[in-house]
Amino acid sequence: DQQVKQNSPSLSVQEGRISILNCDYTNSMFDYFLWYKKYPAEGPTFLISISSIKDKNEDGRFTVFLNKSAKHLSLHIVPSQPGDSAVYFCAAGAAGNKLTFGGGTRVLVKP
Amino acid sequence: DTEVTQTPKHLVMGMTNKKSLKCEQHMGHRAMYWYKQKAKKPPELMFVYSYEKLSINESVPSRFSPECPNSSLLNLHLHALQPEDSALYLCASSQGGSHLNTEAFFGQGTRLTVV
């Protein structure tokens, strides 16, 4: 039972355009959401987070939107850069320090 | 210092060996985690330590034995592993305590191969 889903396994976008990554969750107990970026053979790197009391959080080129009623969050990267090419994981947290990860979306930014 | 340091980076071990993975952070974080990641899959939680006490064990086989000697260190002792245990083992830490769901910082991982 996948509680956190990223339905798009891959995404290709032109440099300078917007990348939109989507994530859906089923567990209404999740109250904190995070996005991680991962390069091959490296650990995930934290990008941005949002708590369930907000619907938007922005940090530079990265913006995360949360729609609690739809149990959906998205990550916008504007403008996309070739260095953004990586696998992006969304993760959801609940009480007890437990993070549940989605399956990941591989992003390719073409120059 | 926002680093989580894991050693070794790579490890090859036989099924009868005993080895340990080590993780260290000096951010004052009180929650530390072990995750396992297979190729093209998301990280899977194995253990959570909160204030040096084991708070979550995700039904991990006993051939994996975690240890938290102090608030900065986390070990994962390995014994009698199987080839299917080959994976990237990730350590992470977060503030923990009342900040249960703050971001977790990950180490670079140990690439484990069981032969």
Image (spheres, coloured by chain):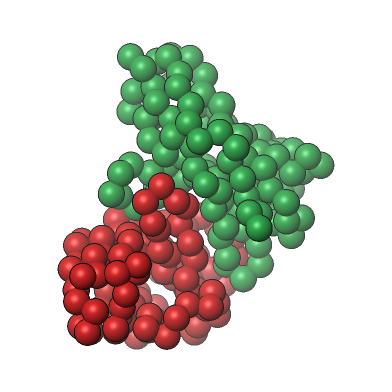
Chain colours: A green, B red
Residue B73 in view of the camera? no
Residue A89 in the figure: left or right of residue B83: right
- When the figure is inspected, residue B61 is found, relative to residue A57, above or below; the finding is below
Q: Position of residue B69 (x, y in %)?
A: 34, 85
Front-most of residues A74 and B28: A74
- Residue lying at 57% horizontally and 65% vertically, measured from the top left: A98
Apparent side of residue B103 relative to residue A38 in the rendered image (left or right)? right
Q: In this orientation, which residue lies closer to the viewer: B31 or A90?
A: A90
Residue A54 horizontal/vertical position (percent): 71, 43
**Nearer-the-camera pick, A60 or B18:** B18
Answer left or right for A95 relative to B18: right
Image quarter for residue A85? top left
Q: Up-down: is B24 above or below A33?
A: below
Residue A44 versus residue A17 in the image, above or below? below
The image quadrant that residue A95 belongs to is bottom right
Quarter of the figure that contains the C terminus of chain B:
bottom left
Residue nearest the observer in this picture, B15 or B92:
B15
Visible residue check, residue B72: yes
Residue, x 74% and y 38% (percent of image)?
A67
Relative to B19, is A94 above or below? above
- How far from the left and from the top, in percent, is residue B106? 38, 57
Identify the residue at image location x=52%, y=19%: A18
**Which residue is rendered at x = 38% and y = 80% of the image?**
B64
